[in-house]
Amino acid sequence: MAIVPNKCPMPTQDAQVRAHNFNEVALGYTKEMAVGEAERCLNCKNRPCVTGCPVNINIPEFIAKVKTSEFEEAYKIITMTSSLPAVCGRVCPQESQCESKCTLGIKFEPVGIGRLERFVADYHNANSKEKVQKPVSNGHKVAIVGSGPSGLTCAGDLAKKGYEVTIYEALHTAGGVLVYGIPEFRLPKSIVAKEVETLKELGVKVETNVVIGKTLTVDELFDMGFEAIFIGSGAGLPNFMGIPGEGLNGVYSANEFLTRSNLMKAYLDHPVTPIMKGGNVAVVGGGNVAMDAARTALRLGAKKVYIVYRRSLEELPARKEEVEHAMEEGIEFKLLNNPVEILGCHNPENPRDPKNGFVKALKCIKMKLGEPDERGRRRPVEIPGSEFVMDMDTVIMAIGTSPNPLIKNTTEGLEVNNRGGIIVNEDGLTSRKAVYAGGDAVTGAATVISAMGAGKVASKAIDEYLMKK
């Protein structure tokens, strides 16, 4: 049978329709599409795709089951190593991980591994009535700090082995960045809730509104009988540029903006927490978070949304698919530009003018690409005298995040690096005995799947430690 050179296209909402709603953009494969895409797999004996997966999903095996329409069997294969298949199938950068290793991708488009993973997970969630069986307890207790992808993965792996696991989440809803950071149109929150519910069926307890470092400390968790602790508290501390005007009303970090929209439902007519809607919006940054913030602002009713990024399109770090979707929806990319000041309204004749103290414009300078930096990317250089001003009502800073220092500051003997990330060894063990860490709390902002991989590594190390103990 001749090889089909291109992936089966993913059905999506029309760009002009989806730009005004929060429904999921990608609609998912049908059974026929999934089987057709699975038939493109060469079933390589050396399985290069698996080496590109941080949680080592048995990719050829699950795709082989999709080929024969054994979708539940495919799901069982995926969940042997992955706790969040419906999530990963949607938000993981497969193009730079498993699909980048696909042999078919040498001459043609690689197999749509992520799309198939999503299909299998969605099929299971829609059709399976089978209840998860809670394992027999082995009598050991483990605490998980944070319910993001690393914490959920670590909790799930340990619960399957009989550990009594409790997750402590600072916010009122479990899911971490999956619920506060990723918009509904990319990852429906019902999917995250389903994954959390599955963990509860395994026996995992979830305690929300508990801030470790405030409500409880790491030492107090040990006093409560936990024998090991995994810290997966993420990187929720936003970075700013340090330019004039960042304190004006109408300036958000992407974290705050997305949390207000995703978790607090600020898009409702009478929200519990407000958010600025309408007008012109500038999002500073070029990563996936910047795309999420820009596309959210558009759906909230912005007149015009701009991505302001200091490098060119080739250096844009966001996923190609997310960039394409943003462009299709009408978001304008102001590339090779960098903000130097946020200008505010100031009316000296009327100190009570309600516009005083709010964003009025964004001043930028044009850039050009110079010599490569230490990572090989060409360094952006300012072009003297090229400053210009754009009328703006809202500015969203999406230039990265750092780990929150709260746990570090309240846990004696916990070593961190100069970026605030917790220092761990290859097993995820910190400088404190029986305290492990992984995900963004260690690396700074990274991908969902890399955080899951860290949670999996730590769960294995915790199991080995407690079994020896």
Image (spheres, rainbow, N blue to C red):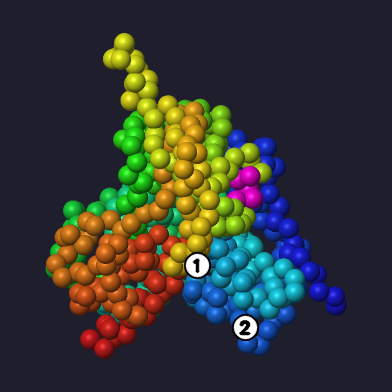
Image disc number at residue 376: 1
Instruction: Report the residue that reaches farthest toward the right.
Output: 1
* Sequence-earlier tag: 1 or 2: 2
As helix, strand or loop, the secondary structure at mark 1 comes to: loop
Q: Which image quadrant is residue 78 in?
A: bottom right
Residue 252 in picture, x, y percent from top left: 38, 39
Quadrant for the C terminus, please. Answer: bottom left
- Could you tell me residue 407's position as x and y percent? 22, 60
Per the rendering, the mark at residue 29 is: none
- Label 2 sits on a secondary structure element that is loop
Whether the magenta-drawn stretch holds residue 325 is answered as: yes
Q: Position of residue 141 (x, y in %)?
A: 26, 73
For the N terminus, the quadrant is bottom right
Query: What separation in Å lies between label 1 and label 2 (alpha carbons)?
Result: 29 Å
Disc 2: which residue: 47
Evaluate whether residue 294 shows in this view. Answer: no
Foreground disc of the pair 1, 2: 1
Identity of the residue drawn at 34% across and 20% down: 346
Q: Which residues are magenta?
A: 323-327
Q: Position of residue 176 (x, y in %)?
A: 39, 55
Chief secondary structure of the magenta span?
Answer: helix
